[in-house]
Amino acid sequence: MSIKTQKIISFFPIVNFIVIIFVWLSFYFKHAMKMTRFLRNVLIIFLGMLVVNIPRVVLYYFVQSNVVDTIAYWISIYLTTLVISRIAIWDQEKYYAEKNSQE
């Protein structure tokens, strides 16, 4: 799957989560990359998820409304899947840029 297609898919949360994760993992297996690179990117994903979800927790603490919490929850789900896909796509672009610069 091309990176351009992955960028388009990244805006559809359910498809994004299913497709991009498998594409990213197959990318690592296909190119036999180091596990440290993968773990570093997973750590970046977790940090991105924290950045996305901490405002929701703070909002829930100050505004204890089920409606506001539900809306914030769905927004954070969307942003979390978007962060995951963007980091995966960024990693693939970085790899191909490094590969092209070596040639």
Image (cartoon, helix red, strand yellow):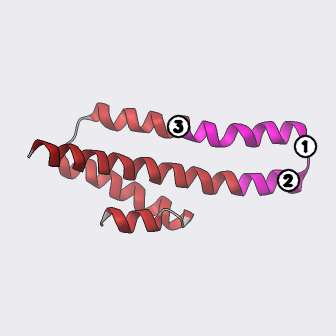
* The image quarter in which residue 58 lies: top right
Mark pair 2, 1: CA separation: 7 Å
Question: Mark 2 sits on what residue?
Answer: 68
* Sequence-first disc among 2 and 3: 3
Question: Mark 1 sits on what residue?
Answer: 63
Tell me the residue at 58%/41% (across/down). Answer: 49
| Span of residues in magenta | 48-74
Q: Residues within 10 Å of mark 2 (few under 14, many from 20)?
A: few
Secondary structure under badge 2?
helix
Tell me the residue at 64%/43% (across/down). Answer: 52
Tag count: 3
Tell me the residue at 52%/49% (across/down). Answer: 83
Mark pair 2, 3: CA separation: 24 Å
Is 57 magenta? The answer is yes
Mark 3: amino acid: Phe
Across and down, in percent, residue 33 comes to 22, 40
Residue 16's label in the rendered image is none
Secondary structure under badge 3?
helix
Mark 2: amino acid: Val
Secondary structure under badge 1?
loop
Mark pair 1, 3: CA separation: 25 Å
Give yes or no for contact between labels 2 and 1 (Cβ–Cβ under 8 Å): yes
Quarter of the figure with the N terminus: bottom left
